[in-house]
Image: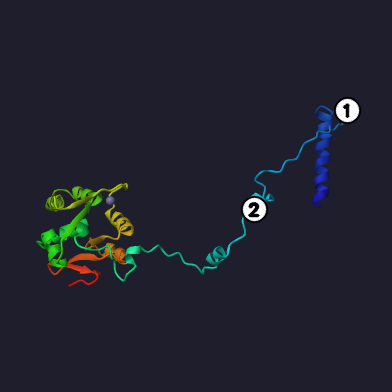
């Protein structure tokens, strides 16, 4: 049915064109010139050997089947049961919240850390924590004064923005030589997932330590 209709329509068009439009030139036979074209295969053609994917190795097959799990490399300092690179004087990275909690509890940071760990401690403050404190304004000027203490070690930041939590996590993933001092629940939970990093926090008007091997507390 469809074909018949198409033919009819085409016939109609053909008659119109021959009547109203210029009639097609007749007589000149179509000539096809033989052009010799070397047919080249596309260099990216899949049929070429170099474009074919190498056969899958056993490892890749196992990965696809979900048999292999990617486990992050564990620091060699964790070869023994606990973190060997943690020795006094301890470097303690403090966050904004920890400084504020210490002030509220009238704790002098360096002294209170020593009382907690029975060893020399160097509080470390990152550029982004400093920037956070500066942003908080005049209400936190005491915290800022505490953070500017010359006994504090300044850890320079190279990242963009001032999101301190991510910065601290990135640091402790790279270097296992820090203790992190924070009272932030979320940050504590994130640190617990990283092996070998003890957490210092404020509890009962003093500092406490979590996960420090052989800790006396
Ligand atoms: Zn930072």
Q: Which residue is mark 2?
A: 52
Q: Earlier in the sequence, mark 1 or mark 2?
A: 1
Image spot of residue 212 (x, y percent): 24, 69
Q: Nearer the viewer, residue 35 or 29?
A: 35
Q: Is residue 7 left or right of residue 154?
A: right
Q: Residue at x 25, y 63 (%)?
A: 86
The vertical placement of 137 against 38, above or below, is below
Q: Secondary structure at mark 1?
A: loop
- Measure how far apart labels 1 and 2 are at the Cα level: 49 Å
Q: Which residue is mark 1?
A: 28
Q: Secondary structure at mark 2?
A: loop
Image spot of residue 47 (x, y percent): 69, 51
Q: Residue at x 31, y 71 (%)?
A: 81
Image spot of residue 9 (x, y percent): 80, 42
Is label 1 or label 2 in front? 2
Q: Count the marks: how many?
A: 2
């Amino acid at each position: 049915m469809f074909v018949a209709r198409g033919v009819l329509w085409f016939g109609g068009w053909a008659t119109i064109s021959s009547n109203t439009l210029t009639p097609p030139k007749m007589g000149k036979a179509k000539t096809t010139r033989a052009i010799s074209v070397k047919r080249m295969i596309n260099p990216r053609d899949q049929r070429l050997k170099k474009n074919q994917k190498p056969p899958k190795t056993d490892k890749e097959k196992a990965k696809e089947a979900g048999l292999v799990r990617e486990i992050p490399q564990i620091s060699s300092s964790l070869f023994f049961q606990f973190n060997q690179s943690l020795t006094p004087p301890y470097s303690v990275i403090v966050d904004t919240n920890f400084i504020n909690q210490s002030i509220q509890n009238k704790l002098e940071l360096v002294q209170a850390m020593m009382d907690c760990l029975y060893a020399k401690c160097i509080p470390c403050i990152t550029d982004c924590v400093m920037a956070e404190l500066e942003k908080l304004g005049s209400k936190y000027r005491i915290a800022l004064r505490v953070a500017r203490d010359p006994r504090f070690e300044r850890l320079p930041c190279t990242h963009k923005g001032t999101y301190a939590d991510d910065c601290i996590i990135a640091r402790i993933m790279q270097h296992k030589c820090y203790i992190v001092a924070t009272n932030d629940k979320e940050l504590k939970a994130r640190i617990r997932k990283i092996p070998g990093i003890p957490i210092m926090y404020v509890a009962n008007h003093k500092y406490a330590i979590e996960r420090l091997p052989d800790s006396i507390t």
